[in-house]
Image (tube, rainbow, N blue to C red):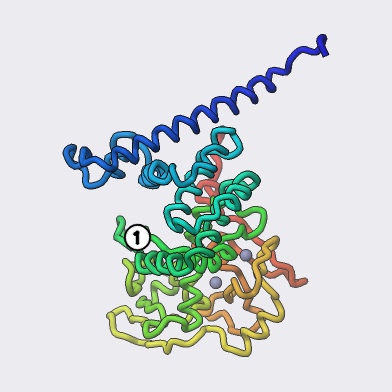
Amino acid sequence: MGGVAPRAGEEIAAELIRRRQKIDHDELEFSVLAAQFAETDEYEWQGFDSPHAWLKANCHISGGAAAARICVGQQLEHIAQSSAAMAAGEIGFAHFALIARTSAAVGERLDQTALLRQARKHTIARFYDDCYHARHAADPKGCAKEEARSVEARSLDISDGDEGTVYINGYLDKVGGAAVRTALEPLAKRAGKDDHRPREQRMGDALVDLSMRALDNGLVPQRAHLQVTASLETLLGLPGAPGANMEFSLPISAKAVERIACDCAVTRIILGSDSTVIDVGRAKRTISGPQRKALKVRDCGCTWPGCDRPVSMTEGHHLIHWIRNGPGDLSNLALLCYRHHWMVHEGGWQIVCTDDGRMLTIPPQTGFERLPRGPD
Ligand SMILES: [Zn+2]
Ligand SMILES: [Zn+2]
């Protein structure tokens, strides 16, 4: 093969593997030192309450990375077979750290040969599961106890941002987290191919949609309905009208009330201009049960062109709002998914039904476009 020039990529590939093995070897030595350091009280002398905290602050690694390295250093003598496999380049440090963690959890009952066989062929994510199963086989009670601890550690912090907005931050155990994701993921899918919302935005929308659905279906005990207080002028969208008040929220715009009242079971408390209560609407749906059934059968899902959201993710929309005397019969109703319902009310889009029953959407007209054009 003398005449063939060596490929540049081939050399880089070999070098990458060499470097990675060297890094893994350094990680191993680092871990031995970290475990030795944890045996001393030097971290206390330096004002830290754990060796992990010291490593985090001084070696600039995460708490998880610090714990993994101390664990590797402590377990090293019990997992010699695995460290030989790492030295031979058969597994990497990440696999090795998982084996160390499993060893720390199950002690004598570790079947290192079996685990190592899986480590050689499985990716880190898959091997993580292998280690869990190995741990569970050896110590089902320990696994259950650990999971119970993380259930007890669930937390959700909803704090005030500016102008009535809220920040959400929280922690969930794996089963609870999976339940939340399973409920949110279908709602967070793109609503048609023109849906360009980034994933974070779709997840935020999904959380709101899920809550609205729970309220709508009476799944929330006691406070089952959004209580909205608005004047007639506000509901009619007359110029000069104030906003509406909603429980647990700062005042909201007339457009938002319009959407919520379009289908949602809201408790309507409508005030006259002199602030006397003129209509305390019972918390009933604005679309009756039989009518909703017929609507679902007719529309089979969101009627926005190109949207494939199923019936379960939609709500009823009055093409002419009932506030403006739009009739409650089927010809004036259409199913829209939450996203598209929002786009119609607050987003400034219009959806109309043509004579042959097709739905047509009209994008928002910005004020700018409506300005008469002057001479260029
Ligand atoms: Zn509507
Ligand atoms: Zn839709």
Mark 1 = which residue? 166
- Disc 1 Cβ-to-ligand 1 distance below 8 Å: no
* Quadrant holding the N terminus: top right
Q: Residue shown at 56%/84% (left/top)? A: 287
Q: Quadrant of ligand 1?
A: bottom right
Q: In the image, 34: left or right of 177?
A: left
Q: In the image, 288: left or right of 250?
A: right
Q: Residue shown at 30%/60% (left/top)? A: 159
Between 81 and 117, the one nearer to me in the picture? 81
The amino acid type found where label 1 is placed reads Val
Query: How far across and how far down the image is residue 148, in percent?
Result: 40, 69
Query: How far across and how far down the image is residue 17, in percent?
Result: 60, 28
Inspect this view and state whether residue 207 appears.
no
Vertical comparison of 283 with 112: above or below: below
Vertical comparison of 59 with 323: above or below: above
* Quadrant holding the C terminus: top right
Inspect this view and state whether residue 102 appears.
yes
Query: How far across and how far down the image is residue 371, in percent?
Result: 52, 47
Vertical comparison of 241 with 224: above or below: above
Binning the other alpha carbons within 10 Å of mark 1 as few (below 14), some (14 to 19) or many (20 upward) gives: few
Q: Residue shown at 66%/65% (left/top)? A: 304
Q: Secondary structure at mark 1?
A: strand
Between 83 and 53, the one nearer to me in the picture? 83
Residue most extreme to the top: 3
Query: How far across and how far down the image is residue 83, in percent?
Result: 51, 39
Q: Residue shown at 70%/67% (left/top)? A: 359
Between 252 and 14, the one nearer to me in the picture? 14
